[in-house]
Image (spheres, grey):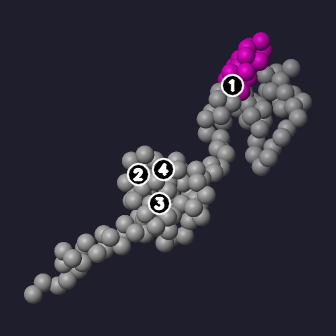
């Protein structure tokens, strides 16, 4: 039995659970078969080579596999109060959320809204604080044309 035959036999003997893609076993068999088609290897080296390839693929799939969906630290409906806005990532309260998202999570408001399925008009500033800042801006004359 050649190395390619051994790889194919392993592929055929394994129970495959595809779930929309190739299993590690089938990927391993394909990689080993491809390698053996173009390079010589002693028969007794093939199982160790297959183990090495399988281990590497397992390691890579563990690192880059889909992560479970994160649930918000606080219910979305309770995340906005008159004086504070709560971060859904960690549950901390803020008057303004944008800086916290950028510094702690390297996330823009748009990314945050998309991640949590929030409307584009979901505020990044607590409502009362926004009103207070608006009043201060009007008092200082911001937004008025100069004569």
Residue under label 4, please give it. Answer: 92
- Front in this rendered view, residue 45 or 97: 97
- Tell me, for residue 116, which label it has, or none: none
Q: Residue furthest left?
A: 147
Q: CA distance from mark 1 to mark 3?
A: 46 Å
Residue under label 3, please give it. Answer: 85
Residue at 30% over, 69% down = 133
Whether residues under marks 4 and 1 lie with C-beta atoms below 8 angstroms apart, the answer is no
Left or right of 50 in this view: 142: left
Callout 1 environment at 10 Å: few (<14), some (14 to 19), or many (20+)? some
Left or right of 60 in this view: 119: left
Residue at 59% over, 64% down = 77
> Which image quadrant: the C terminus?
bottom left
Q: Is residue 51 magenta?
A: yes
> Closer to us: mark 1 or mark 3?
3
- Secondary structure at numbered mark 3: strand
Q: Give the magenta part as a residue range.
A: 37-55
Residue under label 2, please give it. Answer: 100
Residue at 61% over, 39% down = 64
> Closer to us: mark 1 or mark 2?
2
> Closer to us: mark 4 or mark 1?
4
């Amino acid at each position: 039995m050649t190395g390619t035959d051994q790889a194919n036999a392993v592929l055929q003997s394994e129970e495959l659970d595809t779930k929309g893609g190739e299993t590690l076993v089938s990927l391993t068999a394909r990689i080993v078969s491809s390698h053996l088609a173009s390079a010589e290897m002693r028969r007794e080296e093939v199982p160790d080579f297959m183990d090495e390839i399988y281990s590497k693929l397992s390691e890579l799939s563990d690192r880059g596999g889909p992560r479970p969906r994160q649930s918000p630290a606080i219910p979305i409906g309770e995340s906005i109060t008159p004086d504070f806005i709560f971060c859904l990532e960690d549950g901390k309260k803020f008057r303004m959320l944008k800086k916290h998202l950028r510094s702690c999570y390297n996330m823009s408001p748009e990314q945050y809204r998309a991640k949590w399925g929030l409307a584009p008009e979901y505020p990044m500033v607590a409502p009362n604080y926004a009103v207070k800042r608006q009043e201060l801006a009007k008092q200082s004359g911001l937004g008025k044309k100069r004569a």
